[in-house]
Amino acid sequence: MKRRSTRRDVLKATAASLALAGIPGALDNPALAELLTKYNYVPKQRNVPLGVAHGIYPGRVVWVRDPKAAHWDGNRESVSDQWWMDASTDQARVDAMVSLLIQRVTGANSDDTAWKAIFNYYGQRYGKSSERIYRAGEIVAVKVNLNNSKPVVPTNLVNVSPQVTLAVVRQLVHHVGVAPRDILVYDAQRDIYPGLLDKVWNEYKDVRFVQRDAPDPEHQKHPAYGQIHGLEQAQWVEGQSYSADHFDNARFIPQQVKDATYLINVALVKAHSYPYAAAEGGDEGQTGVTLTGKNHFGSIKGPGELHGIINTNQGGTAHAYSPIVDLSASPNLGAKTILYMLDGLYCARRHMSYPLHFPNAPFFNRVEPYENPQWPSSILASLDGVAIDSVGLDILYSQTKNNVDENGHPRIMIRENADDYLMEEALSENPPSGTHYRQDGKPVSSLGVFEHWDSEESRKYSRNKDPQHGKGIELIYLPLTS
């Protein structure tokens, strides 16, 4: 039986016709986007955990917030006082936040013992060794989200911060014993802005970076060596498979990442789509959120090949196959991950976005005027990638309410099906989509635990409510005031 055309079909056809007729931006027109795309995401069930919790303390997610860590004045046009500079973001406070996260995720009383526990747990989880230790010469890759990075003139659009990146590198050097030359910081789909390169190189000149393009000899010179050094273009090799389709460029990852023994996934607290994006430019986006799962779109050569699958106006329908599961289970990516982190110092509402104030609990940031120094100022960490993304999504959704701008538009909106990939990850052995997820020739077992907290006010998960019998997430929220 022939399907009847819906209003949505008509609007899509209209937008496509306008685009073919040469009308600029027809497919990205905010008014059409508002009608085409549903921003109606609502958590369906609360405190109903799905999947298997992972971690030394299963399902534990630690969230540290220090309002004094991020204090940028909010001038989006400034090139002398930008959010990523040390004048705007306090490195010492960020270091303290990361140290506290590492210890509370593991239950250790020092950074050294915390990292030993992380490596031991990684060995146990993947059946390698219950006494696994870091060995000299092993490469640790740090996947950062630099979706808005530019090698010439850095803007005030949001990326992973230099301060969080340096704090992670310091941890690896001083508390794990990784030689700087064996640390690889990368986003293989973007070029790395000088502020991040210099921030790390000024302290550890032999840390390596990998980016999409050949290094810029003028703007990406190494401050210590005076020339291009330690910055490499991704060398693409086949290293990623998918369970429900065959792709071309999406099968390739950087050789440099394939050579790494371990990986730390440092993503952002960031939604992915927003329909009123005139001030930020570009399209509205394709999906609900960009957290640690989608961060690996920056680990493959052809992420554009996957956009249609996650786009809720195309293949990203309710309970559909998600390539994020394959990336998260990949022997060369997700299965190398020893720690998941979310940089929430300055959060975002879209893949290309300026920092966003969070007016609701527990932040209570001022939203007007935009130029004010109150920001989410948070960092999260977990040994469970599904759990940390579940918390990140709950945080983003909590800020959609009572948050309307001068034009009557919500300042942040969450696109439909935003948590579908989390259910697919949590239930990967028998997912809602019915997909037979396989990696390395084996069925993918549960990648972690998915759950929504009880409410935006109390923010309790099942293990918070019942520490003895709870099967889901345990959220430890640590607000710092001194």
Image (spheres, rainbow, N blue to C red):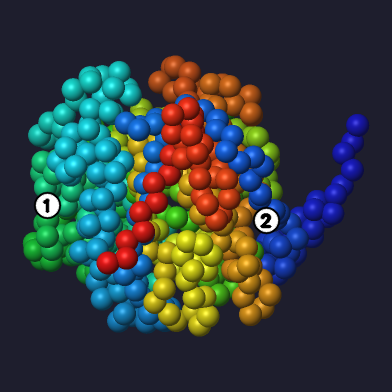
Question: Which amino acid type is shown beneath numbered disc 1?
Answer: Asp
Going 54% across and 65% down the picture, which residue do you hit?
360
Residue linked to disc 1:
206
**Lateral position of residue 254 relative to residue 224, left or right:** right
Q: Mark 2 or 1, which is nearer the eye?
A: 2
Going 51% across and 62% down the picture, which residue do you hit?
361
**Up/down of 30 relative to 108, above or below:** below
**Up/down of 367 relative to 58, above or below:** below
As helix, strand or loop, the secondary structure at mark 2 comes to loop
> Which of these two is toward me, 333 or 382?
382
Q: Which comes before the other along the chain, label 2 or label 1? A: 2
Q: Residues within 10 Å of mark 1 (few under 14, many from 20)?
A: many
Task: Inspect this view and state whether residue 157 appears.
Answer: no
**Up/down of 69 relative to 133, above or below:** below
Quadrant occupied by the C terminus: bottom left
**Up/down of 33 relative to 255, above or below:** below
Q: Residues within 10 Å of mark 2 (few under 14, many from 20)?
A: some
Question: Which amino acid type is shown beneath numbered disc 2?
Answer: Tyr
Going 89% across and 36% down the picture, which residue do you hit?
2
Quadrant occupied by the N terminus: top right
As helix, strand or loop, the secondary structure at mark 1 comes to loop
The quarter of the picture where residue 134 lies is: top left
Residue linked to disc 2:
39
